Amino acid sequence: MLAQEQREQARKLFAFLDTQTTAVADTVYRNEVTDYTCRKQFACERELFFRRGPLFVGLSCLLPRAGDYMTHDYAGVPMLLVRHEDGNLRAFLNVCRHRGARVADGSGQGVKRFLCPYHAWSYATDGRLIARPDERSFAEIDRANCSLRELPVAEKYGMIYVSPAPDTGIDVDAMLSGAQHDMAAYSLDAYHHYETRVLRQKINWKIVVDTFLETYHLQFLHRKTVDPILHSNTTTFDAFGRNLRMIAARRTIGELRALPEAEWNLIPYTAIIYVLFPNTVFIMQAETDSARRHWDRNMALLLATVESEDFPLSEGIQRGFYSGAQDAILFGRNEPSLQHFHKSVKAALAEGNGAAS
Ligand code: FES
Ligand SMILES: [Fe+2]
């Protein structure tokens, strides 16, 4: 986030804290329970958001050097990303053109080629088929027609977007709809990858996003974990097309106020939360001098909080949705981010268009 914008946001937060209020929506929003239970809607979401995309799959620092690769299966489409020797990322369907085996698993570094484990067809990092054992048995099928199926990939602001469907374009700036100014200011391309953790929960994907979209619950559900660190029920809210940003104040934010405005750097005193539509929750937090210890503690706190406080509760919510207790749940005026996220999902489904606009 640019310095001037940080000062503006800080002033907003101070005003909210002084008056014990928060960014508010015009009305309470009733969100139908079928949003989380309807199989037909889920099939549409899967098709539109996860099988067509584009999707944000991670930061550029996941694949810093030529020959670095990763597989990505969370969208339900097997994808393979690799940094080619020309420095550009390439993305493919992770499917061998012989009989369809996965040509790579997990992630790794310094590969020159992918060797299919089944019959050893080998592919260059630009997807070209290099060799196939017993070539003469396949000679009538031109090798040039046996390249890995390429997927659109875009890298900008240190972020990687992939489209799981071939022949679709990716316009990162259109996806971010204004949030790119914040992303550019973070210089994410200078970051290092520290750790990846995978959690699996029995909840609709939107409940995972919902978990992060209000601070109303901190003082209750997270009384001992997060509430001592962040102010409850006070955030900013700004929409960027279908994306959103909310800023939660750390309890230390008073120290910032004591400094001259020209020196205000909001990041150490807040948690800045973005939804990068449709499914990415991106949280910006400050680095400190003792970076590694800090990140270990941060990661441990985040996981302990979501694993033992948020997600067990969320699974209860998901089961409760099937009970027929009510047709709709409520997002209060103090929960504008939740309202915006769900309105955006609905708008995208209605338009049949997964990209932000
Ligand atoms: S399936 Fe890959 S070489 Fe046969
Ligand atoms: Fe929470």
Image (cartoon, helix red, strand yellow):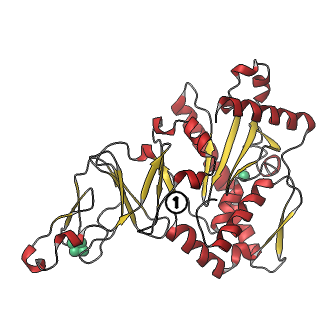
Q: Residue at x 86, y 50 (%)?
A: 24
Crowding at mark 1 (Cα within 10 Å: few <14, some 14-19, many 20+)? many
Residue 171: in sight, yes or no?
Answer: yes
Left or right of 161 in this view: 44: right
Residue at the disc numbered 1:
55
Residue at the spot 58% in from the left edge and 35% down from the top edge: 185
8 in relation to 87, above or below:
above
Where 109 sits versus 270, above or below?
Answer: below
Q: Taking the image as drawn, is residue 93 in sight?
A: no
Where in the figure is residue 30, as x and y percent of width and height? 84, 68
Left or right position of 146 against 269 = left
Residue at (52% x, 65% y) in the render? 53
Q: Residue 320 falls in which quadrant of the image?
A: bottom right
Question: Residue drawn at (51%, 33%), measured in percent from left and top?
Answer: 292
Asked if 243 appears above or below 255 in the picture, the reply is: below
> Can you say which quadrant of the picture contains the C terminus?
bottom right
Looking at the rendered structure, the kind of residue marked 1 is Leu
Residue 151 rendering spot, x and y as whole percentages: 39, 64
**Residue 98 picture location, percent across and down:** 23, 76
Which of the 4 quarters of the picture holds residue 284? top right
